[in-house]
Image (cartoon, grey):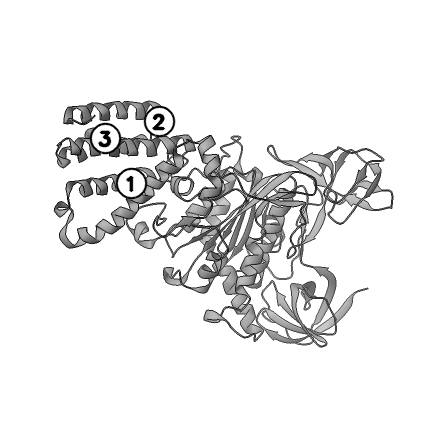
Amino acid sequence: MEVKGEIYRVAGPVVTVAGIKPKMYDVVHVGHEGLMGEVIKIEGDKATVQVYEDTSGIKPGEPVVKTGMPLSVELGPGLQESIDDGIQRPLQTLQEKMGNFIERGVSADGLNREKKWDFKPTVIKGDVVEGGSVLGLVQETYNIEHKIMVPPNVSGTVDEIKSGEFNVEEIICTLSDGTQISMMQKWPVRGPRPVAKKLMPTAPLVTGQRILDGMFPVAKGGTAAIPGPFGSGKTVTQQQLAKWSDTDIVVYIGCGERGNEMADVLNEFPELEDPKSGRPLMERTVLIANTSNMPVAAREASVYTGITIAEYYRDMGYDVSLMADSTSRWAEAMREISSRLEEMPGEEGYPAYLSARLSEFYERAGVVTSLCGENGSITVIGAVSPPGGDFSEPVTQNTLRIVKVFWALDAKLAQKRHFPSINWLSSYSLYNQALSGWFAENVGSDWDELRGAAMDKLQQESELQEIVQLVGSDALPEDQQLTLEICRMIREYFLQQNAFHPVDTYCPFEKQYKMLKAITKYGDMANEALESGAAIEKIVTLESKDELAKVKFEEDFDTALESVMTKMSDEFAQLGGK
């Protein structure tokens, strides 16, 4: 039976209602138009609801209907290739209903009820199943085999199992106690899905971006933050990660981003080719769009919706990468809701529970053994947009306490057209030690040594730059002039990368290793030549050194590099070096 109450008070997206006696986080429908909202505070006989839609025009006395259910997402075949808003309403369905502008009070199912899926069972009558057990398989897209699992809180003996084509609501399995199971599950977004065991990350997320893989790697199942001011390249970096990271599933959340940026993502992703299969990248991507002009309350929901979908595919044994762009807009939505609730403000007006909410979100990342015995992972990469590029503001600082990788974007580097504009002196990764075994086995036994030497050089350059600004580089000793030149090569040849170049947009580890090895070899030969009495001017003006800069753009990289290194050895031999 429907429980109805009425609106008592309205303050923007925050509505106080009376007469429904709900539970915390229950979903309610507010007003004559049935706007969707969520209970966030209960005080006596009154409940406070955050409404996920524009509340203009609603007034006290209008009806409020309780659903008795928390905010949940629909999980099942059809999630891939979907483009949803923050509360899992497919944007394409909304467009068909009302055109290009979303009206209020319109609901849409998260999963298509009409489409039939070919279900192939993997259990038979009499099998004992429990939460997470795989009942059968559905080929969702060309790449993704969707495992239909028993909901986590269900167990029993299979009494009937069907085979054939069904929609997501039709019953495919009946247990001996009468429990009926369809291909669709519903899961409350605020609660993490249960797992059998959480594991330590041991492999890196291969992104093909040299500064990320080479200098500051993130583990598969790890957490990373990309803070940076406006125009420093956060969104392009996030999109590069979505395109190239070696995961099975990509969940991209545009949380409060500008409409034109989100439009670029929505237009570009369906046309991108998956480097793994040559098929459209959208076939293994879920996009959640919640732009800055959409209601603020839905921003918070969009982040939880995305991470719940990611957990569902992780439970099947897939590696998932989740991009949240940006968590600052999410925090701003929390601040606005908090102020309307008249809660005691924390630093810069953010709620006192900001750190706890960020922790809850990032803690849902990790490598796990799921209930069905498969190993899967979620890697969470959150962009942060600090006002004015100030990394001391609360969202950045609270995020830094939680994540293990910090990719600090620098506006000055972006102004110099150095992209990705990640500052190598401010950034860090706490996964280097945990991943050193993987790098030694899969890249090169001296990889850590090469990377460490390159970082030491860049640190030396930072110290020398203070002297250079005072007296000029010509006043430095020759060995320090050579150090500056080697550092310039590391920065321009290795760290700089063109996201829009067909070859340079992705750089595999083998190529990264050879590039760093080549720069290191030049440094060794240059130091030997300098000790042998060769002039610094001749060492830094070798033709082969300049040609090395162009090698990364060559399709036949190995041949081009071998040719350049042979020429370099010859030129150094003529200078007197070995």
371 lies left or right of 144: right
Is residue 230 positioned above or below 492 on the image? below
Q: Is residue 270 visible?
A: yes
- Report the residue marked by disc 1: 492
From the top left corner, tell me how far across and down residue 198 is, in percent.
62, 46
- Report the residue marked by disc 2: 557
Is residue 58 positioned above or below 252 on the image? below
From the top left corner, tell me how far across and down residue 241 is, in percent.
47, 43
Q: CA distance from mark 3 to mark 2?
A: 22 Å
Q: Secondary structure at mark 2?
A: helix
**Which of disc 2 and disc 1 is earlier in sequence?**
1
Say the numbered circle drawn on residue 122.
none
**Which of disc 2 and disc 3 is earlier in sequence?**
3
Amino acid type indicated by mark 3: Met
- Report the residue marked by disc 3: 525
Q: Nearer the viewer, mark 3 or mark 1?
A: 3
Q: CA distance from mark 1 to mark 2?
A: 17 Å
**Which of disc 1 and disc 3 is earlier in sequence?**
1
From the top left corner, tell me how far across and down residue 281 is, in percent.
52, 37
Amino acid type indicated by mark 1: Glu
Q: Nearer the viewer, mark 3 or mark 2?
A: 3
Please state, as top left, top right, bottom left or bottom right, where the C terminus lies in the image: top left
Q: Neighbour class for label 3 at 10 Å: few (<14), some, many (≥20)?
A: some
Q: Secondary structure at mark 3?
A: helix
Q: CA distance from mark 3 to mark 1?
A: 20 Å
424 lies left or right of 525: right
Q: Is residue 292 visible?
A: no
